[in-house]
Amino acid sequence: MPGAEEILDPDADTPKEACGVFGVYAPDQPVAHLTYLGLYALQHRGQESAGMAVSDGETIFIDKDMGLVSNVFNDRRLAALSGHLAIGHTRYSTTGSSTWRNAQPVYRSVGEVQFALAHNGNLVNTAALAEEAGMLPGTVASDSDLVAELLARDIDSSDIERALLEHLPRFKGAFSFVLIDESRLIGVRDPNGFRPLCLGKLDVGWVLASESPALDTIGAHFVREIEPGEMVVIDGDGCRSYHPFGDAIEPRLCVFEFVYFARPDSRLYGQSVHKARQRMGEQLAEQAPVEADLVIPVPESGVPAAQGFARASGIPYGDGFVKNRYIGRTFIAPSQALRAKAVQMKLNPLRENVLGQRLVVVDDSIVRGTTSREMVRMLREAGAAEVHLRIMSPPYRWPCFFGMDTGDRGELLAANMTIGEIQDFLGVDSLAYLTIDRLLEATGAVNAGFCSACLTGDYPVDVPIDLRKDVLEDNDMPPSGLERLIHEP
């Protein structure tokens, strides 16, 4: 039973990313302030906690806390973090609970050696690695904590580089790491490149970031994406590259970076994310045309695709929802009546725009379906004559083990219902999902290599059986899924 007050997430029906990471090597520059600005640009990748580690060449200083970047840091806290290199992290938890203990960067000190690590992604062999290392169950807070502990156990008097080169091939799953010791900034991307990481150049230094807009924010220019399976080390001698995974390289960037996670002004695989999302809308208009009066997006990620759909179909584009930009990720609802308004606290229909209109509503995905159902209800109450829902990705049927949090398969709408049942459940006049081949074509990098396991069930890395226990085969679909979802509170 919920308490008298319940903290609700109006975005609970959307995919959740793991984290954003940032690193900067810039002698004689205010690296803490640069890191703050970089994290601010990556805030969309995680809103639970924020932190940074700064080195002055002798000591690494750590400052981290729960909350948004702007809530954690202020001028006083940044002024106390002086040095010439830094890393930062903004977190959404996928392994490990949402607590201060699990905020990053993770820090270790071994003899004369100190280092700090920040991680975006999710390892799938954490339990096996912990058992091999003789760690007791429950002593490892997260996969990031495990990585730091394994490195700390193997660091001699000199070298984080050597420890990384030895241990990295043992890590399975998704990881984009940034690390610092007293004098070096290091970036690593797993051999599948599940999560993005890019390299930028300042006049007086170097930058690593999850996405290219973080480079723009601090005046760095984009150099290139860190390659899958690459490790870069940045110090006073410049930037050098290693490839510790040998031939085990198979690029598999998460396709949802293009659909939802990345900022529209990011570039991935050399492609504009904004343009790719517009092409998804154009593909939807070609694949699933419909007679309508207005195309409206579900803000924010649905905007470019709705623009593309309108352009390709000739149906006018307009605004159908107003988004409350100040509610943040969660809010407190003291009663059941207000809990039922969770979505409307975030989005409210523009009645004068939708009244009497046949609407095409464009959204990025449907995970659990509760938010989509509520949005349709609001549009009906505002007087929409018809609601045709168009989704810029295929049905989401499989859980992710590589850094995206959506729950197990029993919670995924498309894993428990047919398309017709989903259409009835949501109360729309028609429903269409973009096909996987059209989605990949829309990215502009169809042959570059993508992970689409959440859409296809084809996992590019073997997932241990204890993690796969909730992944059902298609013929094991729970027969009561429709009834359960219809009658949920």
Image: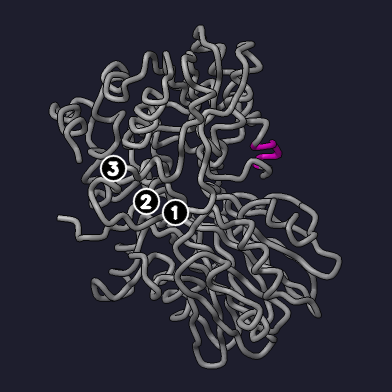
Dividing the picture into quadrants, the one containing residue 52 is bottom right
| Residue 89 picture location, percent across and down | 55, 66
Q: Quadrant of the C terminus?
A: top left
Q: Are marks 3 and 2 in contact (CB under 8 Å)?
A: no
N-terminal label among 3 and 2 = 2
- The residues tagged by marks 2 and 1 sit, at their Cα atoms, a distance apart of 6 Å
Q: How is the image coloured?
A: one colour
- The residues tagged by marks 3 and 1 sit, at their Cα atoms, a distance apart of 16 Å
Residue type, mark 3 in image: Ala
Span shown in magenta: 268-273
18 horizontally vs 1: left or right: right
- Who is closer to the viewer here, 380 or 440? 380
- Work out which residue is located at the far bottom of the displayed protein and give it: 111
- Work out which residue is located at the far right of the displayed protein and give it: 203
Q: Are marks 3 and 1 in contact (CB under 8 Å)?
A: no
10 Å neighbourhood of mark 2: few (<14), some, or many (≥20)? Answer: some
Q: Secondary structure at mark 3?
A: loop
